[in-house]
Amino acid sequence: MQDTYDSSILFLGDSFTEGYLLHPQESFPAILEKKLLAAGANYTVINGGRSGDTAMDALYRTEAFFRNHTNIDFLVLFLGANDAFQGVDPDFTEKRLREIIDTARKYRPAIQVFLMRVSSFGLLPPEATGRFDALFERISAEQDCDLLPFVLEGIVGNPSLTLGDGVHPNPEGMRLAAERLWTLLFVEGRIPLKNR
């Protein structure tokens, strides 16, 4: 795949990023790409979401993105939900997230990394829940990542904003998540809205 513009944004995640059971154009990366185009900000947006992925699964895929796209300047990590669903030890999840960041910086030393907090959804024992919740802030501080809030807060579990499973966003829930990310990343200036 050839990148359209000189700078790319990779959203690496699971079904929340992929847009589970939705049309590809209804995923939040696709919505953001349209908004960027309308704003005249020339970025290629890469949807690196894959349903079911844990941090380990995403790590296996990371290197290929950087081999195939030599201009990824921004990485947004939205991973951990499936680790919680599968009861993966938070220490293991943390190590894999750190390895993803290290891999990205091996290829693009100046890449800007954003790490999104993820809820454990009450699926882990109390002790593991505490470690899971703490890992995002620790990685952010120690690996110089910008920590983002969980953009699906109030969407997951809301029947009007999710599919029948009550977890995955429907088109309206995804639109709301995209609006929140638009504000966090572009309106607040974490990624510049400028012609590249």
Image: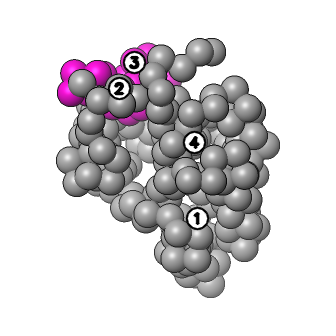
Q: Which residue is mark 4?
A: 12
Residue range in magenta is 20-39
Q: Residues within 10 Å of mark 3 (few under 14, many from 20)?
A: some
Specify which label sits upstream in the sequence, 4 or 3.
4
The amino acid on which the numbered mark 2 sits, given as a three-letter code, is Asn
The dot on residue 42 is 2
Disc 1/disc 2 C-alpha distance (Å)? 40 Å
Q: Is residue 103 left or right of residue 173?
A: right
Q: Amino acid at mark 4?
A: Leu
On residue 123, the disc is 1
Marked residue nearer the N-terminal end (3 or 2): 3
Q: Residue at image x 49%, y 45%?
A: 74
Of residues 115 and 86, the one drawn nearer to the viewer in this rendering: 115
Look at the image and tell me in which quarter the N terminus lies. top right
Q: Earlier in the sequence, mark 3 or mark 1?
A: 3
Q: Decide: marks 1, 4 in contact (CB < 8 A)?
A: no
Whether residue 193 is visible here, answered yes or no, is yes
The residue tagged with tag 2: helix, strand or loop? loop
What percent of the width, then of the height, locates residue 175? 28, 33
Mark toward the viewer: 2 or 4: 2
Q: Amino acid at mark 3?
A: Gln
* Residue that numbered label 3 is attached to: 25
Cα–Cα span, label 3 and label 2: 18 Å
